[in-house]
Image (spheres, rainbow, N blue to C red):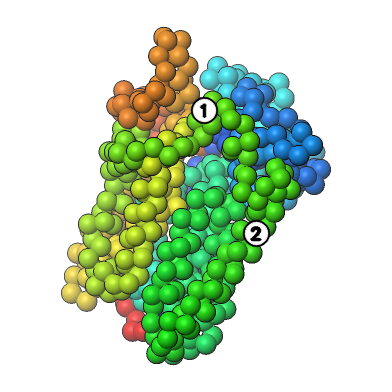
Amino acid sequence: MGIESNISDQKQARRYGTLLFCVCLFFFGLIPYGGVRSSDSEVVFRVAESLANRGVFYLQHDLEDWHAFGVATGKGDRLYAIFGPLESVLLAPVVKAAELVNETGWYKPLIPMLPLSHFSERGFFDYLEGKTTSDPKPHALRMLASFFNVLMTAFGVFVFWRILLLLTQSIPASFLVSIIYGIGTHAWAYAGTFFSEPLATLLVLLSFLYLLKADELGRMGEGNRANRPVFLSGIWMGLAITAHITAALYAPFFALYILWKDYESHPTFLRRLERGAVFAVGVFIFLFLLGWYNYFRFGSFFETGRTVSANSGEIFGYGTFVFPLRGLYGLIFGAGKGVLFFMPVLVLGVFLSKSFLHENRKLFWIVASAVAFRVLFIAARSDWHAGFCTGPRYLVMAIPFFLIPLAFWLKQQEASRFTRAFGLMSFAGLLFSIEQFYFCLAEIFSFLQVWKFSEMLAGFSVFENDVLYLDWKYSPLLSPSSMRIAPFLLHWTKLPMGDLMALGSVVLLIFFGAFYLLLLKMPRSVSK
C-alpha cells in the first residue's frame, strides 16, 4: 500500500498528477526549436533514421560539415555513433511516422517558416542568413520529431511528483516543487532539444521511484515483496545507462542505499545483500546488451567508439580526465555554465537541505553523495562544459535530486506557516521560471557558433582554456539583444525578445497565481 491508499479522495490526487502533466505539456510544447541544432543530436537522429529505414545501426555518411565527429569506423568499415543507442531506438518509430506524414507534402506551403536544422545541407548558414532551404524535406522531418523530448520531460516531471509524494506524503509540497522542476530549471529548455538528457533523467527517476517503492514495502514489514521493485529499479537504471552512459554514476549509490537500509523484514546483511544482487542483475541485463552492442560494432565489449581513433578525442574535444578545479569553478560560477546564474534554484535546494537530513538521514546522505560525486566527476572532465548548449548540460540529470530538499522544507512549514512558506516558494518559482523562459527563448546554439567563427577569423580560439564558457564577454546572460528567438512557434509571432519576455512573464504570473490558489485548497500532509 502506498501513499494514495492513505488519501481519502484518491481520484482527487490523480487529478493533481494529471493536471501537472498537462501543464507541463503546455509549457514544454511552446518551446521546441523544431529541428536539430547540436552535432551530437544530429548523429543520434541519423541513427534513428537508419533504424527506421534500413533496420541497421550504422550510418551511410557522417556530418557533411564536420567529418568523423560523433562516429567511429567499426566492423566492415561501417560508421557507428559513439553515443548511447536507446534514444535512437525510441526515435526510430517516431521518425518512421514522421516520414509517412511528410509524404503528404504538408510542409510545402510553410517552407519560408520552416525551422532549419543546423546540420542538414546548409541549414546553419541558411539560418544565419535568413534564407529558406532548397531541400525542405529533412527539416520538416526533424520538425515533426522534435516533440519527442517534450513527452519525455513531461513524463519525467510526473515521475518526480510521484517520488515527492512517496517521500513527503504532502500533496501541495510535491505539486509546487514539481512545477518548479518542470519550468523553473533547465528541464524546460532541454524539453525543446534532441539531447538525450531528458530521456536519461526520466529513466534515472524511474529507477529512484522503484527504489523508494521497495523501501516503502520494507518499512511496512512486507520486505519479501520488495525484490520485484528492486529488480525494476535495476532495469530502469540499466536502460538509463544505454541512453546516456553517465547515468551509471548513480548506480553504485542506489545499490549502496539498498545495502545500508535495515528493516525488521531484513534484519541481516545477507538479506540486504540479496536485494542488492537483485538490483545489480537488473542493471547488468542492459549493461550486457550494451556491451554486446559495442562488441558487434567494434569487437570489444568496452569500446564505445571514442577511442577507436587515437586523434579523434583531441580533434573533437571528447573528454579526458583533468584536474577538476577549473571545471568546479565553471559549473558553479562560470559565466556560460554556472548553476549560480543559470539555475539558482539548485543553490536554494542546498541551503534548505536540513529538513531532508532530519526526515530521512540515510537517503539524504545517499542523494547528497550521488550528486556531489556527479558534480566532481563532470568537473574532472575536460569537456565539463558539454559544448554548445544551454547551461551545465551534464548536470541536468542531477536537477531533481537538488530539489528534493525543497519539498521536505515546505512540508515542515505546512502546519504553522503554510500561507507564508508556500507563498514565498511560489514567488521564487515564478522568478526562476521567468529566467528559464529566457533560456528557452534565446537561440544559444547559434549565438555560440557565431562567437566561435568571428573569433576564429580574428585568429583567436575561444576553446583555449575554456574561455568561451568562462569569460563574461561570451555569456548569453549579458547578450539578450544578440539572441534570435529559438522556439519555432514563438518565432512565428515575429515579436522581439523583449515583448516575448514581457508576455511570457505575465502568463507565468497568472499560472503561478492560479497554482498558489490551488495549493490553498489541496489536502495537506497525510500520515504514513
Decide which of 112, 48 is in the foreground and name it: 48
- Residue at point 46% right, 63% down? 252
The label number, if any, that marks residue 470 in the structure image:
none
- Residue hosting label 2: 288
How packed is label 2: few (under 14 Cα within 10 Å), some, or many (20 or more)? Answer: few
Q: Tell me which amino acid carries mark 1.
A: Glu
- Residue at point 36% right, 65% down? 366
- Judged from the image, the secondary structure of the residue bearing numbered disc 1 is helix
Looking at this view, name the residue that lies furthest to the top.
458
- Split into 4 quadrants, where in the image is the C terminus? bottom left
Contact (Cβ within 8 Å) of mark 1 with mark 2: no
Decide which of 303, 37 is in the foreground and name it: 303
Q: Position of residue 34 (x, y in %)?
A: 58, 37
- Residue at point 32% right, 67% down? 364
Label 1, label 2: how far apart the Cα atoms are: 29 Å
Q: Position of residue 390 (x, y in %)?
A: 43, 38
Q: Tell me which amino acid carries mark 2.
A: Phe
Determine if residue 6 is in view: no
- Residue hosting label 1: 314
- Judged from the image, the secondary structure of the residue bearing numbered disc 2 is helix
Q: Position of residue 449 (x, y in %)?
A: 48, 23
Q: Quadrant of residue 363?
A: bottom left
Q: Position of residue 300 (x, y in %)?
A: 67, 47
How packed is label 1: few (under 14 Cα within 10 Å), some, or many (20 or more)? Answer: few
Q: Earlier in the sequence, mark 1 or mark 2?
A: 2
Q: Is residue 329 left or right of residue 85?
A: left
Determine if residue 251 is in view: yes
* Position above or below: 35 against 511: above
Q: Quadrant of residue 367?
A: bottom left
